Image: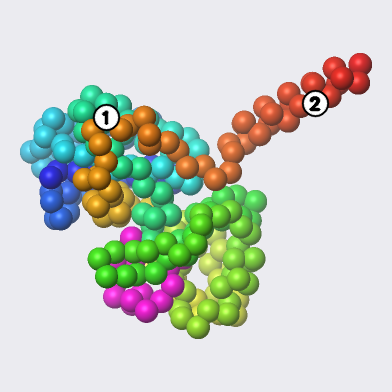
């Protein structure tokens, strides 16, 4: 089973290919939010250098967020379009789940807590807590939006070591290092979003997904896009003004 993985929820644009349980290849670009210009070219390059036709894909796994609203829309839209054209099953994978699967790249976290953190701006992060189990990763909490210092306070009483992954680590690294708690920071090679991890998280989900299920795969924002919030606030003010008048 040949599976294409797509990750665009951060500044990294990444595409990967797996054949069965074997990861074949990955191409990543870290050029900022230019995913709409680069993603399909990246996918085409990946398939050509592995001599796989687009029609030879048996499934697609895509990161659904949370993260960059623009990046998420680009990745999910592209994956849905490809899945529709190929009549192939599509697995939507949270970018937090994908980051947690990065922990499979190190044995250090076998007995610890895995905590991916994605920058949500305003001092906040998107996060969830995971643990490594036989055969993969298990999520222990709901996805959430929380201030970084509040998260560290919540985790400070954990007896196990807490391993942080994700782009918010770089932003809050001094705070993590200075906070009381058994905290470890993942190495740079496995710290960031990766299409490889999206594939690993999606390998069990794809066989369970029906062909033509692309309409069921939707972005996971957690927090509404700022443009939508401002639009709603503006309309609410207009309604209030009309009512008062």
Q: Is residue 10 visible?
A: yes
- Alpha-carbon neighbours of circle 1 within 10 Å: few (<14), some, or many (≥20)? some
Q: Percent x, y for residue 212? A: 27, 29
Query: What residue is pinned by disc 1?
Result: 212
Q: Judge from the rendering whether residue 6 lies leftward or rightward of residue 172; answer left or right.
A: left
Please give the range of residues in magenta. 101-115
Q: Position of residue 98 (x, y in %)?
A: 36, 54
Q: Is residue 178 above or below residue 145?
A: below
What residue would you read off at disc 2?
A: 237
- In which image quadrant can residue 178 be found? bottom right
- Residue 52 placement, left or right of 88: left
Tag 1's secondary structure? Answer: loop
Q: CA distance from mark 2 to mark 1?
A: 42 Å
Q: Quadrant of the C terminus?
A: top right
- For the point 14% across and 55% down, the residue is 22
Q: Secondary structure at mark 2?
A: helix
Q: Is residue 156 above or below residue 209?
A: below
Q: Eyeballing the image, is 8 above or below 239?
A: below
Q: Nearer the viewer, residue 82 or 141?
A: 141
Is residue 27 visible in the rendered image? The answer is no
């Amino acid at each position: 089973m040949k599976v294409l993985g797509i990750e665009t929820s951060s500044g990294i644009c990444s595409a990967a290919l797996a054949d069965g349980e074997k990861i074949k290849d990955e191409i990543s670009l870290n050029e900022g939010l230019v995913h709409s210009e680069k993603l399909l070219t990246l996918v085409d390059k990946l398939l050509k250098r592995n001599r796989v036709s687009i029609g030879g894909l048996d499934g697609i796994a895509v990161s659904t967020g949370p993260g960059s609203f623009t990046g998420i829309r680009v990745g999910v839209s592209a994956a849905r379009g490809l899945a529709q054209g190929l009549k192939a099953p599509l697995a939507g994978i949270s970018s937090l789940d994908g980051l947690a699967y990065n922990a499979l790249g190190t044995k250090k976290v076998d007995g610890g807590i895995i905590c991916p953190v994605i920058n949500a701006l305003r001092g906040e992060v998107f996060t969830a807590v995971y643990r490594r189990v036989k055969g993969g990763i298990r999520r222990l909490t709901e996805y959430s939006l929380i201030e970084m210092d509040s998260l560290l306070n919540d985790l400070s009483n954990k007896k196990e070591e807490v391993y942080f992954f994700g782009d918010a680590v770089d932003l809050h690294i001094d705070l993590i290092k200075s906070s009381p708690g058994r905290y470890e920071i993942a190495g740079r090679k496995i710290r960031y979003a990766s299409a490889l991890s999206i594939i690993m998280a999606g390998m069990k989900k794809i066989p369970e997904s029906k062909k033509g299920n692309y309409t069921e795969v939707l972005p996971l924002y957690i927090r509404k896009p700022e443009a939508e919030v401002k639009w709603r606030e503006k309309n609410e003010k207009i309604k209030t003004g009309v009512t008062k008048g």
